Image: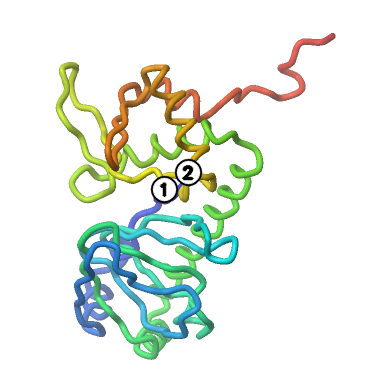
Amino acid sequence: MGLLGGDLPFARTLTAHDHEALVSLGAPKTFAPEQHLLSEGDRSTHVLLVLTGWAMVFVATDRGATRLVLGLRGPGELIGELAALDQRPRSATVQALGPVEALVIPGDGFRHFLARSPRVGSQVMAQLASRLRDSDRERSALASLTVVQRLASRLVELSTTDATAGPANARSTGGGSAAVVHLAQDDLAATVGATREAVAKALKLLRDQGLVRTGTRMVEILAPAPLLLLAKGPHDQRPEARPRR
């Protein structure tokens, strides 16, 4: 499972010349916490390049009653490029987790820029392909892993985010530094495709095992190694590895 992806942020894949040319096309805009950067179904075509802060990408489900988080986007990430390329309605909503500053680039200007810069176009295609692969892995996890496993995996992933900018940071404890994930239970539930009630039960199991400590809008990771083992589950289940009956 992956909300963050393993690739370099889009901006860091560009040459200095291409980066300067891309930045010159847009204007900076600041978004308040929980403000929508983009809205699902909207027909706008502009692109956003995140400069500071983090945002959450999600889609509505069950006629808008719940949501499913698809990813987290941070500094250097490109957002909204799909609508800019195919000029169809936005496929997801992007919401600021905290204060976010982003560069707003008009869709026409972005498309013309890609036509003049094949190297940048190839990076955009690579990013789209990477996110598609991440989406495939998410669907597989939803079908094959329990809520506890999915939650453990998500907490491990979020706890490794840049401590200065992401949804997790480190705080000093008696035994060293512990990662703290700053998300409400509703948001955690949305990141693993489960109900709030199911995530609350899973968190209780993790607390009872001494793996995490919870508070208001926070989960402190006390034992990352066992949590990672739980996230992986019984990984050696190949037929040849099972005992013969």
Point out which mark residue 196 bears: 2
Q: Residue furthest right?
A: 245
Instruction: Return the residue nearer the eye: 205 or 23.
Output: 205
x, y (%) of residue 223? 34, 21
Render colour scheme: rainbow
The image position of residue 221, as x and y in percent, is 31, 28
Q: Residue at x 27, y 66 (%)?
A: 50
The mark found on residue 186 in the picture is: 1
The label shown at residue 176 is: none
Secondary structure under tag 1 reads: helix
**Horizontal and vertical percent position of residue 27:** 21, 82
Query: Under tag 2, what secondary structure?
Result: helix
Q: Quadrant of the C terminus?
A: top right
**Badge 2: residue crowd in 10 Å (few <14, some 14–19, many ≥20):** some
Q: What amino acid type is highlighted by mark number 1?
A: Asp
Distance of mark 1 from mark 2, alpha carbons?
Answer: 6 Å
The quadrant in which residue 215 appears is top left
Residue under the point 45% across and 32% down = 152
| 226 vs 32, nearest the viewer | 32
